[in-house]
Amino acid sequence: MVQKEKTLEAPQVDGEPSPSPVSGEACAEAPGPVEESGIGVELTGHRKFISGVVEGFYGRPWTMEQRKELFRRQQKWGLNTYLYAPKDDYKHRMFWRELYSVEEAEQLMTLIGAAKDHGIEFIYAISPGLDITFSNQKEVSALKRKLDQVSHFGCKSFALLFDDIDHNMCPADKEVFSSFAHAQVSITNEIYQYLGEPETFLFCPTEYCGTFCYPNVPQSPYLHTVGEKLLPNIDVLWTGPKVVSKDITVESIEEVSKILRRAPVIWDNIHANDYDQKRLFLGPYKGRSTELIPRLKGVLTNPNCEFESNFVAIHTLATWYKSNMNGVRKDVVMTDGEDSTVSIQIKLENEGSDEELETDMLYSPQLALKLALTEWLGEFGVPHQYNSRQVPQSGAKSTVIDASSMSAPSLCSSTTVTTVFQQPIMSPAMPPLCLDSLSHPMAKRPQEEEEVEVEKKDSDEEPMEMVVEKLDEPEPDAEADPEEKHVGPILADKMAEDLKPMDTDKESLAESKSPEESIQEDSGSDIAPMQTDDQLKQVPQTFDVFVPGPDEKPLFTAEPLSLEDLGLLAELFYLPYEHGPKAVQMLKEFNWLRANSSVVSVNCKRKETEKVTEWQTRAEKFEEMCCSVIQMFTRLSNSANRTILYDLYPYIWDIKSIISMVKSFVQWLGCRSQSSAQFLRGDQEPWAFRGGLAGEFQRLLPIDGANDLFYQPPPSMPTSKIYSIRPYFAKDEPAIYKICKEMYCEGMEDVPFSDQESDLIGDRLVGGLLSLSPDYGFVLEDDEGICGYALGTVDVKPFVKKCKLNWIPFMQEKYNKPDCEKDLTEAEKMMLSFHEEEEGLPESFLSNFPSLIKVDIHAKVTDPSVAKSMMGCLLSSLKANGSHGAFCKVRQTDKRMLDFYSKLGCFEVAKMEGFPKDVIIMGRSL
């Protein structure tokens, strides 16, 4: 849950990260005796320092198997708490009044039991703030009934969350409560006392960060009311100065602690990525001094949506906490030998770091990152692929159980849940194909009149700026009658389709598809947050051993993933407000090469040898950096642990694609650009760019706003197949001619060209461009050679003149004019075209689309993204040299090329009087 910016009475957009606490998993206890179980009150009476993970993001909740793996890691690393608060579990938030069914109850009990087995305190959170009437005792009773039910599952710790909701109270509440804060505090205190004043009880305020406090933190009436009226043993969640806080200072915590009259529990969104589908955060826990530890009640991390990507976030949080478990202050001299060694090691790390000087002598983010990556590296070599997705099933038929009439032993009946493998690759820039329950009108409760619009606010400071959101719809602020218990048949069916917090219907077992079939389905369906190990074992594990796909390198020949590869991965996907050192260096080098390309331009009159050498040397080093990214992608794609790969693959595919394009463009700059190359761009709309490093590189390319070319969804299954794009050279002509002939004759039973006419197709289709405009040519290569090309000319008018003077006469001499009185073969028709005047295009069209292009790839290339990358390189080169529009010509009878350009999606059919009748013109502005 991460929100952009908030003004008074402006609710947060549900598609963004919420005030979910911290994204790390380190944990430690406050000074005093340590309880081995990791749960409960310490012997001294002082509470344990809360440390761990909150599952509080927007998007698909984690599976039961993933949560149990989380508990194992938390226990291993010393964390003690898990807060259950998935925004898209509809019984946690949207339909909070509804009790869990028998099957759902069993799964919750299994989860709570698993947490207990690993010494992890399970905190159940509920978010009634969207539509609760605080003054209505029936509403309060519904809340008590729901938490009573969960307490019967074995849960002893709870949280009430009022984040990301509208500040306005309903008329009934305004008559009873003097303010919104009073209403929230009143119900929180009542629930806390009703549950017997549990040892751990958390409250998330609506003003959960500094920027949300009106008018500011020290003067906020809301916070003052919370501090004064909330019972003292209830802990308060806080995200820091912002929703996603770059730094959380000691001063800021002391300020808010004074007003809240208690030390807060940090809900840290530093690794949350639910607000930008193009960003992943693999950097270390950072920007929080270890001196915060004795000033806090705890730290919980609300990390990346992709479970396996959180190894570093949680591991480094654990390292951070354990570095100062006993609350050491800077003025305390360390005498412990081990601590002294660590301090010296941190000093050495800081001395060699390019980042800002670390002032915390107990914790080094870089050292913590190395420790985490070293341990994570071992996980990649372990063959693993567990089920992480459940088949959508009918939950409407489940029986609701009342806590007052049940006991834990009565819930032991077995149930079967059918699970399938998660589709490994989701289209990151396209919405899921499922009907999102939260956006569909049928998902509303019967007496809802309309959804309350949630206004999105932009912020110049939060990292959510200029991003594409994770395509999960905002949750409506529903107003429902608390007495409404029955759901109509249509609504029940709709809920069965769309709203599935826990898929448990036994009847759907026979309808489920095999893992092989289901892995090809779209993974946008709502996912059950709970699965049990026993249920997972009932599904055949058909992918236990990795089998390379078509054209994919087998594992035994692939180079193993190295620690350097993981370090590079982490620096490419670092933290919300900063890239890693290597990523920063790549951006800096590309910017310099782009800005200084005039020294190596083809029309540079005075070549300065030293500057040329410097440019070429830096270009070579930049290409080496790009190659290291591509090598990392290949090695990671071949890793044995497919579970980790599936969570990372959309992101590494994306960065590999943009880096490949940038690398090709730099190669072109070094040999083909003109001194007049233009890199200035207009102000694009913020949604035209993706976030993260890929978005930074996109903005540095001439066609920065061509978002369609940069949207390159990964393949349905991970592959290590690599293509490269480079500038065209004269030696490539035979290979391009071969592609032209093979693709032109594809599907023909009899090839209508003799060996003497072997060059005819190439001469007709691309010969002029290769001969007269080689500066705008790119070729696509795989491990077998050239398999595609992209050609163009920056201004077609002078190009046509050159053709008439130099190319056409040569062709007329090479190919005699056929006899027009007889029926002509395909070859003769092509020959005749060299002897006939070609119809030109209207001047009004060429003034807007001056550049001619020609792109094609071999049929064996099945990856559609490479065509977009080639097109991106070609259009970048044309725009850099002054073009503002490009077009291509396709014969009306050439269905293959029409289909090719249509699927590419970046050109539109142009219609204008004066166009040749037998040709379709497709163009786009640059």
Image (cartoon, rainbow, N blue to C red):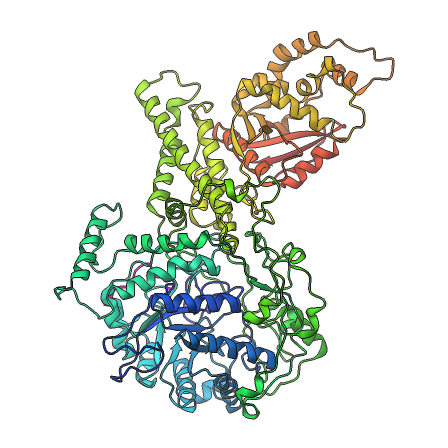
Q: Give the residue displayed 16% in from the left and 61% down from the top.
A: 337
Which contiguous range is marked in magenta?
Answer: 243-251
Q: In which quarter of the image is the C terminus?
A: top right
User: In the figure, 871 relative to 40: above or below?
Assistant: above
Estimate the x, y position of residue 611 in percent, counting from the top left.
32, 23
Q: Which image quadrant for residue 379? A: bottom left
Q: Is residue 804 left or right of residue 750?
A: left
Residue 147 magenta? no
Estimate the x, y position of residue 5 in percent, counting from the top left.
41, 63
Q: Which of 98 and 543 is in front in this view?
A: 543
* Furthest residue in direction top, as rendered: 813
Q: Which image quadrant for residue 500? A: bottom right
Q: Nearer the viewer, residue 907 or 20?
A: 20
Q: Main secondary structure of the magenta part?
A: loop
Q: In this view, does 508 lie to the left or right of 117?
A: right
Q: Can residue 222 be seen in this view?
A: no
